[in-house]
Image: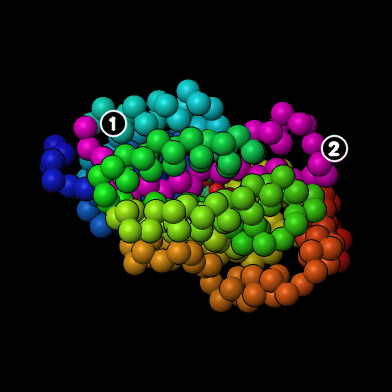
């Protein structure tokens, strides 16, 4: 049975990949959990996380919608405990040229990564500020530093989150609530298959381990840092991106993310 004094963590996109890793970090640090994702896999994740000896509630909700975010927030407030940690991690990508994409799918990327994340942060962030305590981790990406030809909408959403995270952090200075942006590079998760990027060079490049990426993000959040880029090669990429013309960055990304590029030399 859950102990009333155990702190609560909320992790979105916790059914797989980096989110599941973040949920494991929270559980191993002794946090009860409310975890969310869009399909029934979230129940399996909950089952495995309970082995850490913490209470875990799984919420199946489409966080690209207002109803989905409301469902999650209501599940959290129903327990009567304000979360100490919020990991706003759920996100999706979409490969292909923008004009060739199904517009509904492209807009779903924006609704999930941007609008859904904003709804969640607005609601839970207010509660945290009212309590004068809380840690927020937003999963942005090093993709936010690069105009992502053949993944243009996704990279745009991550540029938004990377920027927004620092702005919110500055607004909340002195409130007791910290905001940290985790910026992973290419990570070995279901992301590429879901984003229809499997036949791209990007999807075949060397990938980081999602549990390691999660641990780096979790530790940075616990230290109250503003951002963390996971891994040295990703740190180097972001440093170079800051001094490279945007047009050149977009051309490089095009070679990496163009459909069929995996089959080219
Ligand atoms: P993943 O394994 O595909 O995990 C994505 C998670 O988000 C899943 O739990 C998924 O659950 C959930 N999700 C997606 N859409 C949702 C929606 N509408 N409502 C609720 N949950 C939803 O990929 P990942 O790589 O771990 O991605 C996690 C985060 O890391 C994302 O924000 C991604 O942009 C970011 N990131 C990934 C990489 C990378 O190379 N993998 C690099 C930088 C940043 P369902 O299956 O139920 O939809």
Check if mark 2's residue and mark 1's residue have beta carbons within 8 Å.
no
Local packing at callout 1 (Cα closer than 10 Å; few below 14, some 14-19, many 20+) is: few
Q: 187 or 122: nearer the eye?
A: 122
Q: Which mark is residue 77?
A: 1
Local packing at callout 2 (Cα closer than 10 Å; few below 14, some 14-19, many 20+) is: few
User: Within the magenta stretch, is there residue 24?
Assistant: no
Q: Is residue 248 left or right of residue 147?
A: right
Place of residue 104 in the rendered image (x, y in percent of width and height, measured from the top left):
72, 28
Q: Quadrant of residue 244?
A: bottom right
User: Within the magenta stretch, is there residue 96?
Assistant: yes
Q: Residue at x 44, y 38 (%)?
A: 122
Q: Residue at x 64, y 38 (%)?
A: 110
Q: 227 or 216: nearer the eye?
A: 227
Q: Which mark is residue 253?
A: none
What sort of colour scheme is used for the picture? rainbow
Place of residue 196 in the rendered image (x, y in percent of width and height, measured from the top left):
71, 43
Of circles 2 and 1, the one toward us is 1
Q: Is residue 133 above or below residue 4?
A: below
Place of residue 54 in the rendered image (x, y in percent of width and height, measured from the top left):
22, 45
Q: Residue at x 64, y 75 (%)?
A: 239
Q: 1 or 126: nearer the eye?
A: 126
Q: Which residues are magenta?
A: 80-108
Earlier sequence position, callout 2 versus callout 1: 1
Q: Residue furthest top?
A: 67
Q: Residue at x 28, y 31 (%)?
A: 77
Q: From this viewpoint, is residue 230 visible?
A: yes
Q: From this viewpoint, is residue 211 visible?
A: no
Mark 2 CB within 8 Å of ligand 1: no
Q: CA distance from mark 2 to mark 1?
A: 42 Å
**Quadrant assignment for the N terminus:** top left
Q: Secondary structure at mark 1?
A: helix
Name the residue tied to disc 2: 100
């Amino acid at each position: 049975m859950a102990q009333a004094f155990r702190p609560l963590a909320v992790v979105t996109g916790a059914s797989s990949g980096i989110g599941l890793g973040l949920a494991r970090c929270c559980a191993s640090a002794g946090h009860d959990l409310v975890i969310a994702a869009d399909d029934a896999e979230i129940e399996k994740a909950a089952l495995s996380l309970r082995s850490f000896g913490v209470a875990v509630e799984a919420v199946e909700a489409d966080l690209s919608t207002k109803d989905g975010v409301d469902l999650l927030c209501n599940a959290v407030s129903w327990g009567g405990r304000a979360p100490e940690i919020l990991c706003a991690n759920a996100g999706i990508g979409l490969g292909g040229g923008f004009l060739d994409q199904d517009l509904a799918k492209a807009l779903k990327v924006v609704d999930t990564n941007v609008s859904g994340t904003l709804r969640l942060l607005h609601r839970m962030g207010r509660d945290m500020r009212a309590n004068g305590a809380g840690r927020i981790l937003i999963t942005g990406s090093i993709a936010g530093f690069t105009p992502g030809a053949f993944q243009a909408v996704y990279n745009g959403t991550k540029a938004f989150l990377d920027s927004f995270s620092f702005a919110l952090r500055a607004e909340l200075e002195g409130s007791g609530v910290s905001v940290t942006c985790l910026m992973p590079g290419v990570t070995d998760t279901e992301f590429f298959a879901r984003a229809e990027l499997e036949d791209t060079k990007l999807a075949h490049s060397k990938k980081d381990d999602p549990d390691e990426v999660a641990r780096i993000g979790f530790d940075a959040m616990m230290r109250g840092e503003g951002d963390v880029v996971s891994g040295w090669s990703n740190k180097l990429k972001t440093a170079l991106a800051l001094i490279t013309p945007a047009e050149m960055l977009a051309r490089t990304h095009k070679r990496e993310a163009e459909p069929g590029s995996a089959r080219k030399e």
